[in-house]
């Protein structure tokens, strides 16, 4: 029991699993169960592997805890200590609740990443299906190479994917449906939740605070939709609403945005007026805005207006956060030196912009040259390399004509070596159109000859073979024991690939009477790999002996 | 290029020129030649400002004795700065062409808030605070106190300016607000006072309307400006309201309470000063006996701009004996205050003319007309004598005394309305006394009288003839210019019906009608799907917008719009709206597209331009009539009818249409720009409404676009947008709406140009 050295956080006795009594151990990184009287664990799960835990409803006779793994398997523990069963279960549950999220994040991140890659790249997905699902290579092997690639090779490329903004109407997309019995159903997708979180960070905060300790996810969203916060036109009813705080924080955020002011002086309405009339002067046409008793309807209306402004601002901000962060660093660098000297202030630039008449001033803008194409088809098709051997000088032509003429002069038919009648006629038949030898000359493209489904399969085979071969060839030169091991494994992988994938395909196309040399190239590639392997192996043997 | 405008050499800092610019300069020159006033309407984005500046600067150079100064008035701070930048461009062109450095001096003037460089004062956020704080540091007696007590804080920038700043005039050059601040920082001088001082010898002054129209400020800043100046009011379509605002006063119960406090403070201060420094009060008394002779002399020699608050008669007399001593004056103020308080204790609406009011005040508290007229003057004197530091605290009593002077000076053109409560909340007592000016000509009269040429110009001044009537002046030129276009880049459409044939209108009877609101929503929704980038929508009033937005929200229309574009909405709070505006522009900039819901007559409709992709379509929901139930408006309409023979409906329609034109005009800011203008109200189709739109919009409304349904509008818009999306090159414009010098000089073109100006 090597793992005894691990830190054991909780031990629960009298826990049954598969009708066997035993003890449940919760350790720093895994949960384990061993049958009574035995010295080893028959069940052991890393926390990272556990997707979630489920408990039996209160009041059930059996007090159980179920662990669902990412693989879909589940393990059920039955707490059988009569007196303290419930307490035991609660203790285990509480502890798991604290532990799981820690590991979940790590595991999820990786999983998500893999998932994302598979979803984004259909080829990779196919490859994954071909190689991993059909168990040519293991998932770890598959990913070992992939993830590494993206992680260090060029992070810019993978990160460069543009951040997707948020639809302005994402809240409108959550259409409630009546479920027939006096209730409403809201359909929330991960995207919408993501949008809500990004637009309203306060809701996310609430979510993190409350789920799953106080509320289940479902309860949380139910409350969200019932809240005054969601329906901003409703009047704030009570303070027990967990979202009332969100509204307050939003208000604060809005206020701080307002206080910050605007960067563009041309839209700053506050500084627009040069000289406002003193209080008391002027025709007062508008009713005073500070009127304390605006009707309830009025204030709810203005709340809607505020909400729209806030919502739009937040949506906009959520979309541009990434951009702003990256550009901010660079811009502060530029400004920190001395903005007054190096850059004209924003105001001046804006003023210049507004007073520019681009059509009045002719010359001083940068001249652009219009593209003037004489032969547009050449532009469209790009340059074609000249094939020099097609060009012959006139002297050469004359020479060759002379040569031919000379030869013809000396031509004497060698009648003893001509073909027999029958062979000659069959040769003619074969060479005339429709004949056996003329088939290639009809230039039927492969895509017309082969049904598309076979083509697709072939493509997948190529992709898979390419992937495996890549793995194989990257092992050379073999200079570490690890690589040695890998090259052996890859060889067997290749063989397995040929057996399980390539051969059935070959048989299949034979059955469909298609020309078998479709897979010729694939085989050649495999053969090249094998021969390389053999060369390497014999050399190794020689060295060993 | 160098132009020849009827014998005047004009440097124009561009290589090309729009035909209408040439035409505009022609009219302008004729106005200046005639030493008269002019009303000129030219579409925005056709280079009005640079044409104005080019011509007037050329005129100044050619005949420096005839036109000594250009006073350019604009409305907003960014516009002021823009004008100065255009001027800078012109001057650079001048020196490049002539090869000699310029001896022109031009500057922008703005309030202390925009010019102050004092580290503490300039950090304050509101203009009023800055003014107040500045006063506490720079008032003459504060500085006098410093001589005896060096611990009294003063503004070192002002001190330095006062010590040496006046000796050498500001070197020639173009000074924008920021340049003034830079210069001030370098020299250690106060830019605000420097600018105010330099106003007198500047060739060109750019500032806001208020410095010329508001008597309270004009008296301080602009009264010594030379008579031979040309005054330009740009964006002048609202000038009558500015005039009226500057002469109107509202008094609430709160004002009176604060005023009571002020009077008490004054009383105590007088008591204190009597014990310590009675001599001071005696000196003041003597000065008042002497009368306002000095001011009178100045007025007679015509050095000063007349102050309508301080009419000529006052100057000829001394302050009447009844309010000459400080205590008597405070007693007088108290009585007046009590009278006002009693007047505010009404239960029904009272409306009376100024003579009625004066008679009543004489009957009740025995206050004569004469001392009332000197009230404002007398208070200023007292505040000076008592060395009151923070003038801002005394705004209430200043307001009351200004009111007293105004009410006793003008028997015509004003009305007094006392409302015990607001119309919408009849149960809550909130009495207000409106002393409201109905005649904009009162405030602007001194300007017309004093300066030889006053140019009123804007993108939307139609119908032109109404401005001379309401401002009471006789222009020598009135012209409206169209926009010559190589492609019709504006597409005015009048939507009269929904798809269900419901008539669309914002008129009072159908205002709450769900069918109308729904159809308006559909219009916006459909447009949001086809118009790229930004759409701006204007409503007739804030309340109306709130209601519509709420019912669109309930009907789910807004949600559907959100699928296409983000929604931003103007709020009564300026800071919040600024933020919404900036976000709106950001959303247009990054390609997401956005809709701005806004209000006609609001800040956005008056001061913000939506160039290019910031506004590809503008929708005017309804006709933006002013709230007609207001008593002030009714009184004004009556006055207009009686005095100027302008029918009520004509004026209301004119007012509504100029605001509608302002709103829709926001999207077209130049010939390369393009935009759809949707008038969503069937009333726009009527000739009396349509005829009041500016000519450059009107001429693109054809009979086919008069009473469209929403669907038809969408079809026409799609077609228009597709056309506009084609590349538009300079060559396409050249010779039609853009001219080189040679083209301009051809006979044929000159003939064409003469048709651009539409004389009335």
Image (tube, coloured by chain):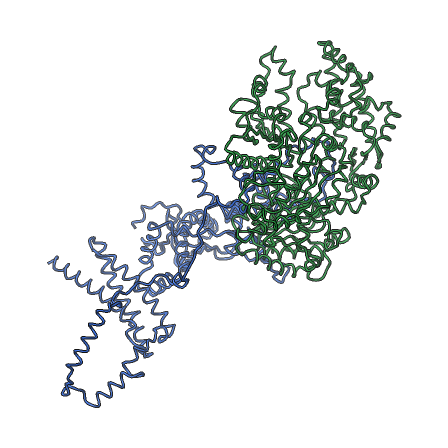
Q: Quadrant of the N terminus of chain B?
A: top right
Please state the horizontal and vertical placement of residue A143, each as a whole percent of the image: 34, 56
Residue closer to the observer: B88 or B378: B88
Chain letter for green, please. B
Please state the horizontal and vertical placement of residue B472, each as a whole percent of the image: 77, 37
- The relative height of residue B642 versus residue A167 in the rendered view (above or below) is above
Decide if residue B443 is on the left or right side of residue B141. Answer: right
Residue closer to the observer: B542 or B36: B36
Residue B518 shows in the view: no
Residue B677 shows in the view: yes
Please state the horizontal and vertical placement of residue B640, each as a whole percent of the image: 80, 40
- The relative height of residue B125 versus residue B149 in the rendered view (above or below) is below
How many numbered discs, if any? Answer: 0
Decide if residue B189 is on the left or right side of residue B441. Answer: left
Within the image, what quadrant is residue A122 found in? bottom left
Please state the horizontal and vertical placement of residue A110, each as a whole percent of the image: 39, 52
Residue at horizontal 71 percent and vertical 46 percent from the top: B759
Residue closer to the observer: A438 or A197: A438
Colour chosen for chain A: blue
């Amino acid at each position: 029991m090597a793992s005894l050295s691990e830190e054991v956080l909780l031990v629960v006795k009298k826990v049954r699993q598969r009708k066997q009594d035993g003890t449940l151990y919760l350790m720093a990184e895994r949960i384990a169960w061993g049958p009574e009287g035995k010295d080893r664990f028959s069940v052991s799960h890393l926390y990272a592997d556990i997707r979630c835990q489920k408990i039996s409803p209160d009041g059930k006779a059996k007090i159980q805890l179920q662990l669902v793994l990412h693989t879909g398997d589940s393990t059920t523990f039955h707490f059988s200590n009569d007196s303290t069963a419930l307490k035991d279960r609660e203790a285990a549950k509480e502890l798991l609740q604290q532990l799981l999220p820690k590991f979940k994040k790590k595991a999820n991140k990786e999983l998500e990443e893999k998932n994302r890659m598979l979803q984004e790249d259909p080829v990779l997905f196919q490859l994954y299906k071909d190689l991993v699902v059909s168990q040519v290579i293991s998932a770890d092997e598959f990913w070992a190479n992939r993830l590494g690639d993206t992680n260090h090779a060029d992070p810019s490329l993978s990160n460069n994917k543009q951040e997707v903004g948020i639809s302005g109407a994402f809240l409108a997309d959550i259409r409630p449906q009546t479920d027939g019995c006096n209730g409403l159903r809201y359909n929330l997708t991960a995207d919408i939740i993501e949008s809500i979180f990004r637009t309203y960070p306060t809701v996310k905060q609430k979510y993190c605070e409350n789920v799953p300790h106080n509320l289940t996810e479902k309860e949380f969203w139910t409350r969200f939709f019932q809240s005054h916060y969601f329906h901003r036109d409703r009047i704030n009813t009570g303070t027990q609403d967990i979202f009332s705080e969100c509204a307050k924080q939003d208000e604060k955020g809005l206020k701080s945005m307002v206080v910050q002011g605007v960067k563009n002086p041309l839209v700053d309405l506050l500084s627009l007026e040069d000289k406002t009339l003193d209080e008391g002067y002027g025709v007062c046409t508008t009713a005073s805005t500070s009127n304390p008793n605006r009707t309830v309807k009025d204030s709810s209306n203005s709340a809607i207006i505020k909400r729209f402004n806030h919502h739009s601002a937040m949506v906009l901000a959520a979309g541009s956060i990434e951009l702003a962060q990256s550009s901010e660093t660079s811009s502060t660098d530029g400004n920190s030196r001395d903005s007054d000297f190096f850059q004209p202030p924003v105001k001046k630039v804006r003023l210049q912009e507004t007073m520019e008449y681009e059509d009045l001033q002719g010359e001083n803008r940068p001249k652009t040259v219009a593209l003037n194409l004489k032969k547009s088809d050449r532009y469209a098709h790009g340059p074609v390399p000249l094939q020099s051997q097609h060009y012959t000088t006139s002297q050469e032509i004359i020479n060759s004509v002379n040569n031919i003429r000379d030869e013809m002069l000396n031509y004497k038919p060698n009648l003893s070596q001509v073909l027999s009648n029958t062979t000659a006629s069959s040769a003619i038949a074969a060479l005339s159109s429709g004949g056996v030898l003329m088939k290639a000359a009809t230039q039927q493209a492969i895509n017309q000859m082969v049904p598309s489904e076979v083509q697709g399969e072939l493509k997948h085979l190529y992709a898979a073979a390419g992937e495996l071969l890549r793995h194989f060839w990257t092992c050379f030169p073999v200079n570490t024991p690890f690589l040695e091991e890998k090259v052996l494994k890859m060889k067997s992988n290749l063989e397995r690939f040929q057996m399980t994938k390539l051969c059935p395909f070959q048989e299949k196309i034979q059955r469909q009477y298609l020309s078998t040399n479709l897979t010729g190239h694939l085989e050649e590639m495999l053969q090249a790999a094998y021969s390389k392997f053999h060369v390497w192996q014999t050399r190794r043997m020689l060295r060993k002996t | 290029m160098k132009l020849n405008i009827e014998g005047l050499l004009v440097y124009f800092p561009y290589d090309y020129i729009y035909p209408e610019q040439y035409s505009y300069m022609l009219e302008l020159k004729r106005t200046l030649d005639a030493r008269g006033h002019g009303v000129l309407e030219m579409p925005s984005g056709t280079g009005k400002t640079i044409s104005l500046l080019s011509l007037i600067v050329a005129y100044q150079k050619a005949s420096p004795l005839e036109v000594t100064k250009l006073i350019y008035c604009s409305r907003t701070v960014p516009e002021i700065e823009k004008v100065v930048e255009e001027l800078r461009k012109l001057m650079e062109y001048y020196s490049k062409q002539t090869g000699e450095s310029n001896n022109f001096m031009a500057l922008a003037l703005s309030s202390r808030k925009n010019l102050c460089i004092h580290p503490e004062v300039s950090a304050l956020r509101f203009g009023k605070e800055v003014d107040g704080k500045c006063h506490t540091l720079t008032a003459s007696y504060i500085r006098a106190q410093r001589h005896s007590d060096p611990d009294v804080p003063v503004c070192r920038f002002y001190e330095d300016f006062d010590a040496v700043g006046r000796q050498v005039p500001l070197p020639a050059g173009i000074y924008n607000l920021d340049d003034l601040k830079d210069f001030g920082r370098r020299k250690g001088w106060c830019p605000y006072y420097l600018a105010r001082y330099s106003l007198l010898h500047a060739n060109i002054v750019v500032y806001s309307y208020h410095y010329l129209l508001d008597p309270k400020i004009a008296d301080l800043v602009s009264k010594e400006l030379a008579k031979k100046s040309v005054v330009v009011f740009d964006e002048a379509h609202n000038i009558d309201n500015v005039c009226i605002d500057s002469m109107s006063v509202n008094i609430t119960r709160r004002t009176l309470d604060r005023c009571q406090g002020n009077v008490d403070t004054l009383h105590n201060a007088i008591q204190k000063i009597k014990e310590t420094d009675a001599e001071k009060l005696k000196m003041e008394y003597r000065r008042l006996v002497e009368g306002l002779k000095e001011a009178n002399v100045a007025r007679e020699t015509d050095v000063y701009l007349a102050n309508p608050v301080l009419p000529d008669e006052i100057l000829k007399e001394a302050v009447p004996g009844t309010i000459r001593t400080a205590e008597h004056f405070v007693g007088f103020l108290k009585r007046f205050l009590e009278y006002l308080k009693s007047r505010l204790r009404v239960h029904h609406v009272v409306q009376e003319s100024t003579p009625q009011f004066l008679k009543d005040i004489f009957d009740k508290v025995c206050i004569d007309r004469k001392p009332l007229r000197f009230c404002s003057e007398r208070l200023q004197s007292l505040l000076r004598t008592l060395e009151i530091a923070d003038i801002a605290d005394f705004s209430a009593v200043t307001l009351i005394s200004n009111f007293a002077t105004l009410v006793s000076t003008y028997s015509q053109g004003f009305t007094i309305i006392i409302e015990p409560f607001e119309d919408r909340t009849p149960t809550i007592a909130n009495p207000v006394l409106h002393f409201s000016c109905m005649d904009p000509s009162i405030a602007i009269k001194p300007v017309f009288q004093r300066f030889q040429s006053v140019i009123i110009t804007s993108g939307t001044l139609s119908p032109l003839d109404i401005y001379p009537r309401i401002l009471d002046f006789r222009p020598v030129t009135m012209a409206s210019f169209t926009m010559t276009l190589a492609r019709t880049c504006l597409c005015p459409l009048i939507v009269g019906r929904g798809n269900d044939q419901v008539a669309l209108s914002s008129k009072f009877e159908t205002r709450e009608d769900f069918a109308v609101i729904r159809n308006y929503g559909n219009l916006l929704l459909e447009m949001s799907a086809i118009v790229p980038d930004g759409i701006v929508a204007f409503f007739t009033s804030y309340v109306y917008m709130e209601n519509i937005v709420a019912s669109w929200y309930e009907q789910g229309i807004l949600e559907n719009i959100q699928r296409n574009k983000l929604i931003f909405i103007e709020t009564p709070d300026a800071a919040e709206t600024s933020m919404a505006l900036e976000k709106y522009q950001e959303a247009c900039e990054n390609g997401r597209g956005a809709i701005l819901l806004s209000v006609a007559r609001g800040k956005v409709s008056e001061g913000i331009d939506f160039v290019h992709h910031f506004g590809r379509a503008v929708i005017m929901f309804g006709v933006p009539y002013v709230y007609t139930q207001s008593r002030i408006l009714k009184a004004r309409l009556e006055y207009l009818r009686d005095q100027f023979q302008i029918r009520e409906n004509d004026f209301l329609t004119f007012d509504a249409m100029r605001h509608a034109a302002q709103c829709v005009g926001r999207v077209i800011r130049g010939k390369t720009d393009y935009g759809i203008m949707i008038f969503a109200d069937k009333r726009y189709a009527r000739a009396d409404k349509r005829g009041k739109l500016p000519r450059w919009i009107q001429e693109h409304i054809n009979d086919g676009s008069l009473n469209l349904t929403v669907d038809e509008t969408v079809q026409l818009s799609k077609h228009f947008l597709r056309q506009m999306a084609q590349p538009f090159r300079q060559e396409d414009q050249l010779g039609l709406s853009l001219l080189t010098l040679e083209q301009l000089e051809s006979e044929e073109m000159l003939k064409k140009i003469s048709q651009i100006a539409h004389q009335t």
